[in-house]
Image: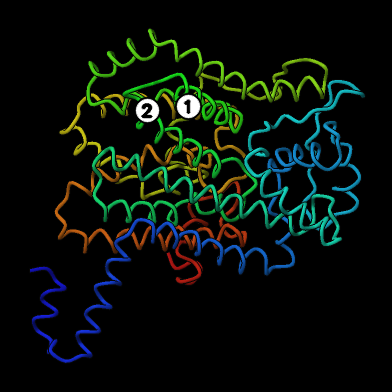
Amino acid sequence: MNSLSKLYFVLPINTPYFVHYGIKMKTFLKICSSYKFWVGFCFIYSVVFAFFFRFSNPEKRHNVVISDAKGYYAYFSGFFIYDDLNFNFNQTVELKDHPETQYTDYRYKLDKDRVYTKYYIGTAIAYTPMLLSAHAISVGLGWPSDGYTLWYHYAVVLASLIYLTLAMIFMRSVFEYFDIKSWVKNLIIVGVYLGTNWFFYTTWESGLSHSYSAAVIACFLALFIKYKQNLTPRRMANLGALLGFIILLRPTNLFVVAFLPIFFPSRAEFTVFFRNSILRNKATIAGLLTVFSVVFIQLICYKVQIDQWYIYAYEGEGFNFLKPNIQKFLFSIRKGYFIYTPIMIFSLFGLYRWYKKSKFQVSYWLLIMFAHIYILSCWHMWWYGGTFGTRVMVEYYIFWMIPLGVFFSSISRKYVYLSTPLFLFFILNGQLQTYSYIHGMLLWDNMTWKLFKDVFLFPMVPYGTF
């Protein structure tokens, strides 16, 4: 007898009121147990947050596209509005006509005639459909249509929220592959989104690449799971196009390919797949061709800008593989991954449960995740500039959510009464940290333990309580 049946037993359900109440409660519980309901909840909550905290604030509403995002966004303006991939409008429209935005000069020069931006075009492609809609509305209604008015900022946030929805939809396929329970899927998708900086980079700094990368990577993984038993040329071409897009968004995200073996229960099964479906399958050529075709878009941009097919755009920046900063990357107060994303600590507990099911998957996960963190921590600026938490991990949260889901799926359902309050605390902490960050109390750089303690759980807990 479930809890709802017990409710019917103890109440005088022969009366029409309680029969009606019971039916409504049963419908409500059914709705709340739906994964789609929680995806919709995250979308609507994000819209409300963006409206009240971003677009109702006269000083912040025009600053969706800031910092690095300016360099991504410039491709849209250069292609569709100004026909100028040397970005001369940066010195006129952006600098002089829109002082309300945070101006950034994202242009780099080889010489006085050849100008380029070091940022890649993938993020601009991701939000171009919504920007074109905003541009069409502006032109149609006779409003200013220079690419930097409020409608365009709306469009970028909406694009980010659409990609959020897609990410969550495709993540569901990944969770189902690992037999993660329904209630756990709901718990972790809400907990990780609202309790980490994924929320911030979706609703606030929506112009950066992370929310888009998370969605395209989730789509790539979901289709790989679906196709891996029969990789036809058409399917490989689809996977190749997605992988090319992933690279255009952020070239280091090519590393996602290294995670694919975790979708095989044993090393033997992966070896057979790799030998028969990759090395001996002509469809692999179709996949490689589509990868190159998509990445070629960036090379065309370089050719138009500087009359050469390639340039290492991050001159003076790079990886120093002899000097990793793993401890700082994971635990420092400056940007430590586990400090600002504490919910992921439970993923480590999940590895033990997962290991009982598949030693290969967990052993490989540990190996490749260590390699991934090692590489990221070797970047010359291991904290990745002015960020909220470790932003370069956002697109890889899906790989942390797998052991997190395995952990909670393996415990008895009675412990849901313990896990739910815990997740609610992580959500509360994540939302309060987001509030503190956008109000300048959590610093974008150079945080200290003293300041972190002072603003912990602010504004619900008075400043300096801890």
Along the viewing direction, whichever of 66 and 215 lies nearer the viewer: 215
Rendering quarter of residue 278? top left
**At x 54% / y 27%, what residue is drawn?**
241
* Residue sitting at the far top: 280
Amino acid carrying label 1: it is Leu
Q: Please report whichever mark, 2 or 1, sits nearer to the chain's N-terminal start.
A: 2
Along the viewing direction, whichever of 151 and 383 lies nearer the viewer: 151
**At x 61% / y 25%, what residue is drawn?**
294
Residue 179 vertical placement versus 5 (above, below): above
**At x 34% / y 52%, what residue is drawn?**
188
Please state the horizontal and vertical placement of residue 298, each as a whole percent of the image.
69, 25
Rendering quarter of residue 175? top left
* Disc 2 to disc 1: CB gap under 8 Å: yes
Please state the horizontal and vertical placement of residue 381, each as a whole percent of the image.
59, 32
> Which residue, given by chain and number where applicable, does mark 2 sit on?
227
Amino acid carrying label 2: it is Tyr
> Which residue, given by chain and number where applicable, does mark 1 sit on?
239
Helix, strand or loop for disc 1? helix
**At x 45% / y 14%, what residue is drawn?**
284
Q: How crowded is mark 1: few (under 14 residues within 10 Å), some or many (20 or more)?
A: many
Please state the horizontal and vertical placement of residue 239, each as a whole percent of the image.
47, 26
